[in-house]
Amino acid sequence: MLLIRNIKELVQVEEKPVRFRAGKEMQNLPRIKDAYLLIDKGKIKDFGPMEKLGEIRADKEIDATGKMVFPCFCDSHTHIVYSGSREIEYIDKIRGLSYEEIAKRGGGILNSCDRLREDSEEALYEAAYARLEEMKSFGTGAAEIKSGYGLDTANELKMLRVIRRLKENSPLTIKANFLGAHAVPREYLGRQTEYVDLIINEMIPMVASEGLADFVDVFCDQGFFTVEDTERILMAGIKHGLRPKIHANEMARSGGIQVGVKYHALSVDHIEYTGDEEIAALKGSDTMPTILPGAAFFLNMPYAPARKIIEAGLPVAMASDYNPGSSPSGNMQLVLSMACVNYRMVAEEAINATTLNTAYAMDCADTLGSIAKGKTANVFITKPIPSIEFMPYAYGSNKVETVILNGEVQ
Ligand code: NIG
Ligand code: FE
């Protein structure tokens, strides 16, 4: 048993867990001042104010005077299995080329695809594991990881096997997402429908038969896959037991949000181009609108209308999108800062967006995303901080001191 005592504030506590927080409720972030937290067998056993702490014999105690305890961040959208880096394109972008122009010149995702095909499973695993460790040091306890740089059957399976090894060996909770429809590979240029056929007839059945993915994803956007391609892929994925998550409306109002909702996607992600029709489609659905602040920041693209979405009564989740092309960072504390500065969210909303709501967006709301009895003990202890607002405010420093995953101090 592990006891953390004298916690300045225990953040995001739930007596009766909810699946996510939406609309005005996003400003609700339940906390207990001067609290304790008791962890047993990898799970949260009990918590409350210090004055209610009875006689407890714990094997280990941590005194958290002046420090806060949060549930770890859930990062529901990443692409951390990749080779090399793409800083040359970053400079091209600064000089004026758009993301789509870079992709058309054979850069972008296809550049990462060339490199990944040459790399061994071992090298990919080592690099991705190191990225997970860095994410953990910033307070992330769970990550969804996508394929999508292989773009042929052998290399997509290679990526998913790397993700399976990460699942087995990393202390983080990991979900695998099959994103064969990330881009049309060079050998299929001009033959997009045939590539979609390959995804449907060969890749999805193999991925499913090896149990390599939890989700299926499509980059449904202008210049990438159409709504029709997306529908075909989602139907095939669903038939094989894969729940959809979609890359939608990053470049244009592409219909990606509506098609996601139609097929009960767990989340629609990016969503920079969201208008009244998209909001109407999301209302009453079970699809989590997910914003990726790092990508919009790094590509210098328009920001998704987070306030408008929240004011419509909807939830918002926020993830890192950690990838070599549009967001080479998995620092969720930075996502908190961007949520506040660029999307005009208050600290409570930003914390809900990166914990409980992202847990929902990666199908982990039952076990992660909040401090609730019986949930997995994935929490971090901060350095001494004055307030929860200090987390997004001090945007350049790592405020996390100790990370505990599955009840184990890391
Ligand atoms: O989520 N938008 C599509 N895919 C990734 C970028 C991948 C890349 O550029 O390598 C994203 O931003
Ligand atoms: Fe992405």
Image (tube, rainbow, N blue to C red):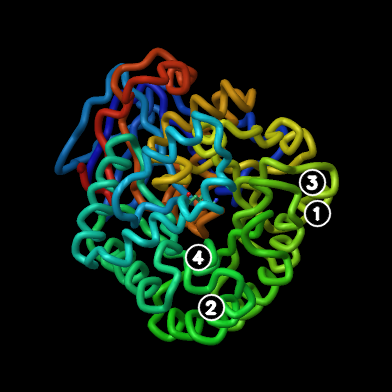
* In the rendered image, the vertical position of residue 132 relative to residue 12, given as above or below: below
Q: Earlier in the sequence, mark 2 or mark 4?
A: 4
**What residue would you read off at disc 3?**
279
Residue extending farthest front: 105
Indicate which disc residue 281 carries.
1
Asked whether, in this view, residue 120 is left or right of residue 332, the answer is left
Q: Disc 4 or 1, which lies upstream in sequence?
A: 4
- Tag 2's secondary structure? helix
Amino acid type at image mark 2: Ile
Contact (Cβ within 8 Å) of mark 3 with mark 1: yes
Label 4, label 1: how many angstroms apart (C-alpha)?
A: 24 Å
Q: CA distance from mark 2 to mark 3?
A: 30 Å
> In terms of depth relative to the viewer, which is nearer, 94 or 286?
94
CB-based contact (under 8 Å), mark 2 and mark 4: no
- Whole-number angstrom distance, CA of label 1 to CA of label 2: 27 Å
Residue that label 4 marks: 179
Q: How far apart are labels 3 and 4 at the CA level? A: 25 Å
